[in-house]
Amino acid sequence: MTHQLNIKSLGLPLAKLIGLVNQRKELLLNQYLAPFNISSAQFKVLAAVHYYGIDSPADLSKYLTIDGGSMTRMVDRLVKKELIDKQPNPKDKRGVILELTITGKLLLAQCLECMDNQVAPLLTGDLSVQEIEQLSALLKRLLPA
């Protein structure tokens, strides 16, 4: 019984740590993506469309847990920046299909390079490659299968 209580009591500090790491990640992303004139939220939309094939604002909203109105405004900003193209959905007259423009694909590649070379080292600190792999494996185990 004591073992069970100890595990449960560790959950809150662990949740706090995960939240703090997420806040640091967002701060770093926004800081390092700013020269590209893109926010971390906009970057996530580009990545979701390009890498995960999520091509409707409604599906993006669900995937990124952003309310529908905010997603509509974000998509409109990305269209205005010429990073995303909106086309009518032939299967649903009310819907649209999103696709990255060539400019959007090039920007996404630049952002990913920045993340690999500048953000990732700051996020992982002095962890060894083995420690990063171990942390990654443990965090994946916390996610539903």
Image (cartoon, rainbow, N blue to C red):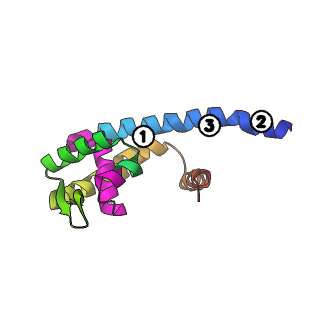
As drawn, 41 above or below 60: above
Prevailing SS of the magenta stretch: helix
Q: Residue at x 82, y 40 (%)?
A: 3
Cα–Cα gap, marks 2 and 1: 29 Å
Label ID, residue 14: 3
Q: Residue at x 19, y 45 (%)?
A: 76
As drawn, 72 above or below 87: above
Cα–Cα gap, marks 3 and 2: 12 Å
Q: Is residue 57 visible?
A: yes
Q: 25 or 8, which is in the foreground?
A: 8
Q: Residue at x 47, y 39 (%)?
A: 22
What residue is pinned by disc 1? Answer: 25
| Front label number (3 vs 1) | 3
Percent across and percent down for residue 106 are: 20, 58
| Tag 3–tag 1 contact (CB < 8 Å) | no
| Mark 2 neighbour density, 10 Å: few (under 14) some (14–19) many (20 or more) | few
Q: 128 or 59, which is in the foreground?
A: 59
Q: Farthest residue toward the front?
A: 93
| Mark 3 neighbour density, 10 Å: few (under 14) some (14–19) many (20 or more) | few
* Quarter of the image with the N terminus in it: top right
Of helix, strand and loop, which one carries label 1?
helix
Q: Residue at x 24, y 39 (%)?
A: 34
What residue is pinned by disc 2? Answer: 6
Of helix, strand and loop, which one carries label 3?
helix
Disc 3 residue type (three-letter): Leu
Rendered image quadrant of residue 14: top right
Q: Is residue 47 magenta?
A: yes
Q: 145 or 10, which is in the foreground?
A: 145
Of helix, strand and loop, which one carries label 2?
helix
Disc 2 residue type (three-letter): Asn
Q: Magenta stretch: give its range.
A: 32-60
